[in-house]
Image (spheres, helix red, strand yellow):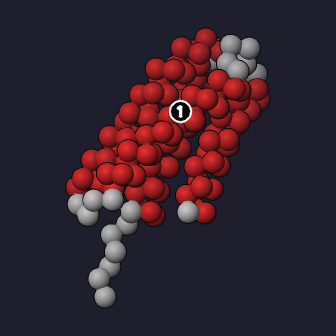
C-alpha cells in the first residue's frame, strides 16, 4: 500500500509540477495554463486506476492486460482532450510541445505498466 500511494501521489504532484517547470525553463508562456489546471487534469486522469484495480483482481492475465491497456488509453485520451488545446496555445515551438506531450504520455504509460508488473504480477507457485 505504501508503494502504491507513493507512486500515485508522487506522480499526481510531480508530473504537473515538472510540466509547468519545463514550460517555464524553455521560455514558453505559462499564462494560458495554470498549475492548478494541470494538477486537476492529471489527477482526474488517474481515476482510471480504480476500475483497472477492480478488473485486475481476476486471475486471468489476458483480462488484466486488457484492463491495463484500456485504462491507459482512456487516461491518455482524457489528458489529450483536456490539455492539448492549452498546450498548443502556450507552447509555440513544435519540438517543445511534442516533448511535453510525449513526456506526459510516457509517464502515464510507465505508471500503468509498473502498476501491472509490480502490483498484479503473477504469483509463482512453490
The residue labelled by disc 1 is 44
Residue plotted at (51% across, 40% down) = 46
Q: Residue at x 37, y 47 (%)?
A: 52
Label 1: element kind: helix
Residue at the far bottom: name it: 126
Q: Nearer the viewer, residue 83 or 29?
A: 83
Residue 36: percent from the left, percent from the top?
A: 69, 26
In which quadrant will I find the C terminus? bottom left
Query: Residue 88, can we see it?
Result: yes
Vertical side of 37 occupied by 117: above or below = below
User: Residue 92 at x, y = what percent?
Assistant: 63, 14
Q: How many marks?
A: 1
Q: Nearer the viewer, residue 42 or 23?
A: 42
As drawn, is 58 to the left or to the right of 81?
A: left
Q: Residue at x 65, y 15 (%)?
A: 90
From the top left corner, tell me how far across and down residue 56 is, in percent: 33, 55
State whether residue 101 is above or below residue 122. Answer: above
Residue in the image at 57% along x and 33% along y: 42
Examine the rendered structure and indicate whether residue 120 appears above or below residue 72. Answer: below
Say whether residue 102 is visible.
no
Q: Nearer the viewer, residue 14 or 47?
A: 47
The answer to whether 85 appears left or right of 28 in the picture is: left
Q: Position of residue 57 (x, y in %)?
A: 33, 59
Q: Residues within 10 Å of mark 1 (few under 14, many from 20)?
A: some
Q: From the image, which quarter does the N terminus lie in?
A: bottom right
Q: Is residue 9 left or right of residue 69?
A: right
Amino acid at each position: 500500500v505504501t508503494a502504491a500511494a507513493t507512486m500515485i501521489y508522487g506522480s499526481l504532484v510531480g508530473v504537473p509540477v515538472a510540466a509547468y517547470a519545463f514550460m517555464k525553463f524553455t521560455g514558453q508562456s505559462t499564462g494560458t495554463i495554470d498549475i492548478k489546471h494541470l494538477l486537476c487534469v492529471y489527477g482526474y486522469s488517474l481515476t482510471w486506476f480504480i476500475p483497472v484495480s477492480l478488473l485486475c483482481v481476476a486471475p486471468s492475465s489476458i483480462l488484466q492486460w486488457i484492463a491495463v491497456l484500456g485504462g491507459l488509453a482512456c487516461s491518455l485520451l482524457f489528458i489529450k482532450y483536456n490539455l492539448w488545446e492549452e498546450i498548443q496555445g502556450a507552447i509555440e515551438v513544435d519540438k517543445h510541445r511534442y516533448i511535453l506531450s510525449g513526456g506526459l504520455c510516457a509517464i502515464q504509460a510507465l505508471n500503468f505498466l509498473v502498476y501491472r508488473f509490480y502490483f498484479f504480477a503473477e504469483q509463482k507457485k512453490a
